[in-house]
Image (cartoon, rainbow, N blue to C red):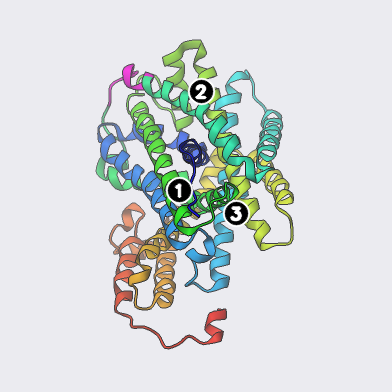
């Protein structure tokens, strides 16, 4: 029997995925990058789009190609290694960094400006309320596509269209000269800034969540699942590209209204107030709250779904555990949370990229088992060196590595490893012990 979805359901599916992606990092990083890139905004934006749109889209397609699950994506890795890797990614993208960041950004940009003297107690109360709401939406897995895709996201998208139109028709300043690393290598710098969105990690989670949503709609055939997963990925990618281009341009033209701002949240807030006057903060509050809430719902749902599959604890109990953890971590503070997350992202992002690329090469590899293990190991080792450098550890001995100075010392060794594994012949029939590994 041919399985199909209505156009409205396909659109809602894509909108749901877009809303899951569009969260805190997607809003706060592009404006600052745009301002610092200045006249080099185009190459910086292209670099950013590669990691913040291109990689998540390719990851979604990889999940579809692999069969719609993490297990199939990592089938050639040792089971324990694949489990550890996935647990780390889910913790980072869930209760440790990305999910709490949604609550923090929502507070900093949408609520804090309304208080003359904001205290820690305000953040604590808001984080509790915010994540209780997110937990309530996450409670029923099967209704996510209807609630997020058909209700919350359209409202969010309308707000973003209004903001983007105002930015392009009424820019608040001239584009000035590039600053810092954007002056010498804007493309590479933009590429690395895209790490901060964590969307490639998110795609590993959300892709599986979309597969679950499709099953809830009666789509269980592999071919149909792959088709609709790719459709959802394309819709989300177009939406994200629209948002990033407008936010980069907003940042590039913000030198007058937001000179000296040290983060994208401040730039966006000042720019919106300049555009819309006294109503600017209300517009920004609606956009930020909806963007952060939908992402928090997606992250909590995906983490709870995954951890319930690993343990005897039910999905709904994991929703509560993850929600409470997010509310607690959110009280650390935005700057501290971002500072803590950067070295971790530098360590794991290259591994995720290598895994995705290998998925597309798998059918042409003479020995997928050895290829996956070798390439992933090489990418991890050199990514850890890059991460150590970002964390302030002296790793100057590795300065001879190409691109090491721009934080991409992992790239050429990983590419070289991928080329080498094509010359490794087929192995003998694997033993039962190897399979168990």
Residue on which the image places disc 1:
228
**142 up-or-down from 40: above or below:** below
Residue name at image x 54 percent, y 67 percent:
82
Residue placed farthest to the top in the image? 278
For label 2, the SS is helix
In the orientation shown, which residue stands out farthest toward the front? 1
Label 3 element class? helix
- Residue 240: % across, % down: 41, 37
Q: Is residue 131 left or right of residue 353?
A: right
| Residue topped by disc 3 | 91
Please state if 219 lies on the left or on the right of 356 as rendered.
right
Q: Nearer the viewer, residue 136 or 380?
A: 136
Give the residue at mark 2.
284
Task: State how far apart marks 1 and 3 are (Cα).
Answer: 27 Å
**Range of magenta residues:** 166-175
Q: Report the Cα–Cα distance between label 2 and label 1.
A: 32 Å
Which is more toward the observer, 261 or 414?
414
- Element class at badge 1: helix
Which of the two residues, 255 or 65, is positioned nearer the viewer here? 65
């Amino acid at each position: 029997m041919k399985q199909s979805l209505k156009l409205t359901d396909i659109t809602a599916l894509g909108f749901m995925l877009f809303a899951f992606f569009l969260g805190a990092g997607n809003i706060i990083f592009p404006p600052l990058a745009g301002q610092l890139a200045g006249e080099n905004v185009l190459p910086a934006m292209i670099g950013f789009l590669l990691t913040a749109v291109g990689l998540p889209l390719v990851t979604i397609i990889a999940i579809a190609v692999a069969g719609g699950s993490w297990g199939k994506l990592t089938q050639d890795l040792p089971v324990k290694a694949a489990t550890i890797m996935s647990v780390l990614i889910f913790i980072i993208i869930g209760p440790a960094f990305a999910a709490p960041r949604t609550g923090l950004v929502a507070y900093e940009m949408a609520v804090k400006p309304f208080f003359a003297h904001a205290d820690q107690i305000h953040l604590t109360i808001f984080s509790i309320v915010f994540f209780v709401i997110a937990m309530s939406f996450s409670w029923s897995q099967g209704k996510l596509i209807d609630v997020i895709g058909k209700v919350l996201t359209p409202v969010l998208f309308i707000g973003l269209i209004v903001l983007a139109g105002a930015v392009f028709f009424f820019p608040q300043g001239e584009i000035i000269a590039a600053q810092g690393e954007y002056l010498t290598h804007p493309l590479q710098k933009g590429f690395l800034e895209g790490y901060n969105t964590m969307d490639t990690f998110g795609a590993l989670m959300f892709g599986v969540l979309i597969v679950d949503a499709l099953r809830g709609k009666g789509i269980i055939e592999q071919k149909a699942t792959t088709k609709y997963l790719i459709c959802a990925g394309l819709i989300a990618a177009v939406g994200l590209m629209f948002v990033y281009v407008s936010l980069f341009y907003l940042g590039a033209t913000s030198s007058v209204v937001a000179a000296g701002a040290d983060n994208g949240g401040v730039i966006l807030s000042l720019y919106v107030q300049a555009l819309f006057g006294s109503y600017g903060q209300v517009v920004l509050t609606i956009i930020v709250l909806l963007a952060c809430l939908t992402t928090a719902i997606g992250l909590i749902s995906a983490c709870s779904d995954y951890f319930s599959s690993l343990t005897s604890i039910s999905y709904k109990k994991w929703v509560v555990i993850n929600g409470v953890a997010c509310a607690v971590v959110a009280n650390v503070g935005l700057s501290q949370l971002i500072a803590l997350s950067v070295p971790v992202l530098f360590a794991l992002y290259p591994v995720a990229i290598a895994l995705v690329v290998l998925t597309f090469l798998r059918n042409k590899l003479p020995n997928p088992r050895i290829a996956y293990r070798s390439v992933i190991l090489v990418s991890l080792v050199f990514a850890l060196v890059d991460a150590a450098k970002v964390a302030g550890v002296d790793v100057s001995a590795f300065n001879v590595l190409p691109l090491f100075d721009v934080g991409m010392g992992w790239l050429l060794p990983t590419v070289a490893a991928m080329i080498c594994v094509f010359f490794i012949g087929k192995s003998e029939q694997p033993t039962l012990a190897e399979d168990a590994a």
